[in-house]
Amino acid sequence: MITSVLVANRGEIACRVFRTCRDLGISTVAVYSDADADALHVREADAAVRLPGAAPAETYLRGDLVVKAALAAGADAVHPGYGFLSENADFARAVTDAGLVWIGPPPEAIEAMASKTRAKRLLGVEPLVDVTERDLPVLVKAAAGGGGRGMRVVRELGDLDQALKAASAEAASAFGDGEVFVEPYVENGRHVEVQVLADAHGGVLLLGTRDCSLQRRHQKVIEESPAPGLHTDGTGELHARVRDAVSRVGYVGAGTVEFLHEDGRWHFLEMNTRLQVEHPVTEAVYGVDLVALQIAVAEGAPLPTGPVVETGHAVEARLYAEDPATGWTPQTGVLHRFEFPAGPGVRVDTGYASGDTVPVHYDAMLAKVVAHAPTRAEAVRKLAHVLERAVIHGPATNRDLLVASLRHPEFRDVDRLDTGFYGRNLEALTRPRDGEAYAAVAAALADAAGAGGRFGGWRNLPSQDQVKAYGEHEVRYRPSRGGGYEVTAPEGVRVVSADPARVRLEVGGVVRDFDVARYGESVHVGPYRLTARPRFPDPADQREPGSLLAPMPGTVVRVADGLAVGDRVTDGQPLLWLEAMKMEHRVIAPASGTLTALHAAPGRQVEVGALLAVVQADVTTEAQEEDPV
């Protein structure tokens, strides 16, 4: 029997495995990098071992250090979680060679299926080799790992070489394996997968289907089980192909086989030889604990043979520290408050708590929020409600996007579900919500109330409008008789009461309360996150035109080949690449012109707002004609 488990991972998946271990009476061991010294998964473990450094390549991807940590802590088993080393056959062998139990599939099965190129060949599907115009669009994809990293869509043949280099570099950084391949790109299919469990006695358990079609950057955002709207005969075909794949490789443990469904056809994508991020929706619908079953299989027990009953519908949303409106830019900083409303059928898996800091080195996912209900419509409604009422004070998140996605007509209509959802709808989904203007009013009045009626640091006559701006919202107000306030813009707002922490407004005859919390220039009003706009910009913050600033803290991983000060660059040309939160981000020329400064070099750590380069734009002919002689 297993008595102590080390989880070779971090964040929410480590916390989630620890939860099951506690239920089973198994001791837990965490590993942590220097950046994670105070992380929640470290606090929740019975013991923890430091991996010196911060970058994944020197910490969580160092299998030798992880094995030493397990032995030093007295663990007798290792659970890999997902990502990092979870699909690394050499690591699985190192674990078993050290006399430890590996809670995962045999190394031979990992080798057969974890490499997407080998898996495709096993099922008779060959990657593209000599790509031509007729093959476009194509997808460049990492052979190891997942989570959307090491993937690039190529629509122009001339972009293929650069996409191969970029995907390979990103894959090597995220998974320690830079192998990539090319496959046809299915533009708007449905992403459907099957959860599989197999034991060492020939038992195979298939747990329905999941739909994971809502994706950004080929990484899943909203998942659900069962996959809605699939015909029974289609599901039967899917399960038959999964059973065949499992039997071919002698699979043991948990895994997921993924497909794209388009025009009645199933396109095999890959088999993930590990637990999936979205496994909670399957657990909710089938009433099982997949981690407990993984541990039982690792101990040599057979899987249950009785029928597993499907009950209701479950939907999961991945909450990320990112800004969808600015290219999904990852965010870092302190989570001042991080709380979710409890209720029946609601589950939150997270690696963070109030007061924790979101670091730059790892994936930007903060939590997985799951709702389970008798029907899909009820589960979707419940999940949107929970997300909307969560208290998230800190970095920008995709919370508003998730709520808007769940309530979008295309998501509600299962016949319109496909992977092109965000490509079609992102702009509309990221527009400011109607209530944001009133949240700005509440923020301004709370600020005024906190200043004791002094209205801030500049003098105005009491009868004049006071002005506060938050993003694109400008609020105008003045003191009223009796010590209250009168709002002049936006129109139609009556102030019922205002104090520094709560403001009550009446709009259109409806009275609403707004809870207000301020952290520097960031103001949280209910579910709204606002940034105060300075009345008088600091001259020191002004940059010369063409300055390229780091959009997030990260590491410069590459600079364009041969790029040097004085070079001509063209509008949109990639100049350098930053890696932050396990994703690679291009920094491009804002206009055609001359590179007059370059402050980036591979390996350099940069903070948000750091000056990376300057491009002096060409002067247009029209501007030259208008310029006085």
Image (cartoon, helix red, strand yellow):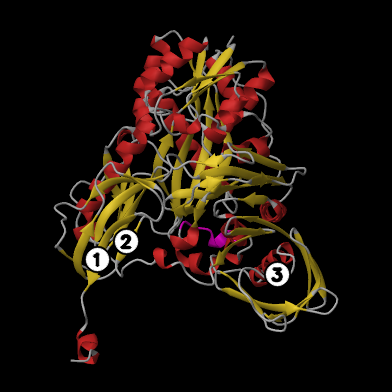
Using the rendered view, name the quadrant where residue 246 is placed: top left
Q: Residues within 10 Å of mark 3 (few under 14, many from 20)?
A: some
Residue 169: in magenta span: no
Q: Give the Cα separation between the discs numbered 2 and 1.
A: 8 Å
Q: Position of residue 442 (x, y in %)?
A: 71, 67
Q: Nearer the viewer, residue 252 or 330?
A: 330
| Vertical relation: 476 (above or below) 383 | below
Q: Position of residue 563 (x, y in %)?
A: 16, 55
Given this view, does label 3 or label 1 mark the residue nearer the observer?
3
Type of residue at label 3? Arg
Report the residue at 47% width, 35% height from top: 242
In the rendering, which numbered label is found on residue 454? 3
Residue 357 appears in the rendering: yes
Quadrant the N terminus occupies? top right
Q: Which residue is mark 2?
A: 548
Q: Position of residue 271 (x, y in %)?
A: 42, 35
Q: Which residue is mark 1?
A: 615
Given this view, does label 2 or label 3 mark the residue nearer the observer?
3
Quadrant the C terminus occupies? bottom left
Report the residue at 42% width, 50% height from top: 218
Where does the magenta region start and end? Answer: 413-419
Q: Give the Cα separation between the discs numbered 3 and 1.
A: 44 Å
Q: For numbered disc 3, what is the local secondary structure?
A: loop
Tell me if label 2 and label 1 are in contact, CB under 8 Å.
Answer: yes
**Nearer-N-terminus badge (2/3):** 3
Type of residue at label 1? Val
Type of residue at label 2? Leu
Q: Is residue 98 left or right of residue 559?
A: right
Q: Is residue 126 left or right of residue 540?
A: left
Q: Residues within 10 Å of mark 1 (few under 14, many from 20)?
A: many
**Nearer-N-terminus badge (2/1):** 2
